Image (spheres, rainbow, N blue to C red):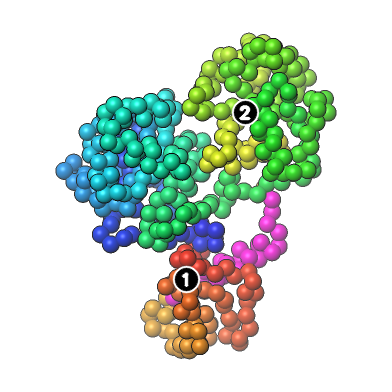
Amino acid sequence: MLRMETSWPPTLSLAAGKQWHLFLSHSWANQDVVATIKHRLELMLPRVQCFLDVDNLNSLDDLEREVALSQAVLTLLGSTKYLSSPNCRREVAEALRRHLPLVRVHEADPSKGGSPLKVLRDECEKRTPDHTKYLFCAQETKAPIPWHRLPYFQQKAVAAIAERMLLSSPAYNGRPAITLHVGDGLAWSQLSFRQPIKLYVSEDNPPAAEVKEALVEKFGDDVELVPSLQAATHWLLFLSPSSFRDEKGERLVKEVATALRERRAPILLWSHNEDEADFDEIVNATPKELREAGLYNPLAIEWHSEPDIHFPVSLRLVARELGAQATGGGVRECMARASRACVACVYMAAKELVSIGQACDARAGSDGAGLLKSRSGLVVVRPSARSKSGSMSCRSVLRANGSSLDTELVEDVGGGEQPPLV
């Protein structure tokens, strides 16, 4: 489940006259992607309302109406058929006419109906030039979200979709950004090494230097760089179709072959960017002797460079291969979680008591704050007039005898986020 930095789920709100938080615009060639996006959003943001034609459209005549009822529009930039489809063009035209914010998602894999962004942009310019700026240039600070089928990357992509969708809602309108996370999601996990590792990167494999530097920046002294494979506990090999070409490539072939004979397999990385080949081309460009020696027995990690939204996932996948493990939160963090859970339960119970008239006492303070006291003697602090949220926020919980729980461990709801049901 997605949560704000306060650990509460985000507020889902709709402006007057709106029915859908997100309209999913796509071509049939990418139907599987939008179906997955809708399913994952509904799991991670309960009560979200997403429009998908196969689920919600009664008639094609209603297409513009449904776009108008939406707060934001997700455009799935994958197949070039999206730009030639009359119905997709109707959806984009109506969204443009109403100045609806876009959430752009890019499917690049050609085997899954994807295309490079440049190909899609050129196709749009040729067919509907009036839509080019809206679809490809209007939000230059927010690049299209790369879509992935690997679970860890997909989880991060759905969180990014939700963040951009929520910025168009009344609860978060005007904010430059919001940050969502999944409690046990790899992209947001805290990893550490039980003992320092010694890492080697060949001088004849320049792309691996970026990964090495990112690891050192993240983990500091726990990652010690060493000048030779013999002194290392682990080593990285970043692959591309040109890795084993020219003089450097020949030296790298010898180094990798020696390591494989000594059963010192590297951690493999590769990158699938706009101008780079897919993994099959990398394998085909690898010398036969290395393939037969088992170079590709371990799975290669797809690397995404910063500021790509998937960079945290790539970095943590590499760290786990190097032996990093999830860091325990310690006693204080466990107490904080327990405290938040207790507060959430008390909040929901007290709110219910108030709503049905079982709260019998309300005393206002000088700042507009007050205490709501139920017949059971449980007392919950009511928000002050200066509270950021118009709804009840739970700042501390008091026992009937007046003693207080550890309020340092109780997080203020603030900003409109609602306590979770636990």
User: What amino acid type should be assigned to the residue bearing mark 1?
Assistant: Lys
Residue 272 among magenta residues? no
In the image, what residue occupies the spot 67% across and 25% down? 206
Q: Position of residue 236 (x, y in %)?
A: 69, 28
User: As displayed, is residue 27 above or below residue 205?
Assistant: below
* Numbered label attached to residue 344: none
Between residue 184 and residue 127, name the one nearer to us: 127
Q: Is residue 164 visible?
A: yes
Q: Which residue is mark 2?
A: 269
> Magenta residues, as a range?
327-351
Q: Which residue is mark 1?
A: 388
Residue 309 image offset from top left, x and y in percent: 52, 41
Q: Residue furthest right?
A: 231
Nearest-to-viewer mark from 1 and 2:
1
Which element type, helix, strand or loop, lies under badge 2? strand
Residue 321 shows in this picture = no
The secondary element bearing badge 1 is classed as: loop
Q: Amino acid at mark 2?
A: Leu
x and y percent of residue 404 in the render? 62, 80
Name the residue located 76 percent from the left edge and 39 percent from the top edge: 223
Choose between 363 and 38: the one closer to the eye. 363
Residue 334 is inside the magenta segment: yes
Considering only vertical position in the picture, is 22 above or below 291? below
Circle 1 residues within 10 Å: few <14, some 14–19, many ≥20: few
Cα distance in 3D space between marks 1 and 2: 46 Å
